[in-house]
Image (cartoon, helix red, strand yellow):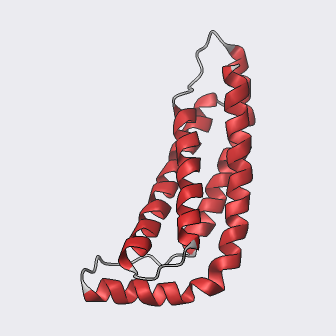
Amino acid sequence: MEPLSAVASAIAVVQVADRVISVCKAYITGVHDAPIELRAVLIEVGSLKCVLEVLELSVPSPQIPSQIGILEKLIGPINGSGEALRQLEALFPQPDIPVRGKRKRLGLSLASLAWPFKRDKAFKLLEEIGRHKATISLGLTTEAA
């Protein structure tokens, strides 16, 4: 597998992370008593995004074959984190049309009422994302050494 495909996968996962981050921010800022767990989601997804952005900058040079091997080994955790993020994103309702004002707050409030039913699934996905992030970060650290 090409090392550039690992970077392309990372870019796709960063895009999903951006969507999850924006939804979490909307809930946190739009709902008066937003669940505190959303901040944990925001932090974990944001840190994964940062790690993947560093990976994007680590496009290997043809002169260093060890970098190519590390990126090829990271494709599994990159894809795994992307799948977990997509499942996490599915837990949050996506508005079909942009709604402003009271309707938006009402929709966010109703969604926050459903959060307790989704909390356990979200935390399992966050643990999985954290494991993938640690693997990717370790791979990048060994590459830099």
Q: Position of residue 128 (x, y in %)?
A: 73, 58
Left or right of 18 in this view: 90: right
Q: Position of residue 87 (x, y in %)?
A: 62, 68
Q: Is residue 123 visible?
A: yes
Q: Position of residue 111 (x, y in %)?
A: 48, 85
The quadrant in which residue 30 appears is bottom left
Q: Residue furthest top?
A: 63
Q: Quadrant of the C terminus?
A: top right
Q: Name which residue lies at 67% across and 47% down.
A: 133
Figure check: 102 above or below 23? below
Figure check: 68 above or below 54? above
The quadrant in which residue 18 appears is bottom left
Q: Is residue 74 visible?
A: no
Q: Name which residue lies at 51% across and 56% down.
A: 17
Figure check: 45 above or below 49? below
Q: Position of residue 137 (x, y in %)?
A: 67, 38
Left or right of 71 in this view: 110: left
Q: Name which residue lies at 46% across and 82% down.
A: 33
The quadrant in which residue 118 appears is bottom right
Q: Name which residue lies at 67% across and 62% down.
A: 126
Q: Quadrant of the N terminus?
A: top right
Q: How many marks?
A: 0
Left or right of 30 in this view: 43: right
Q: Nearer the viewer, residue 104 or 40?
A: 40
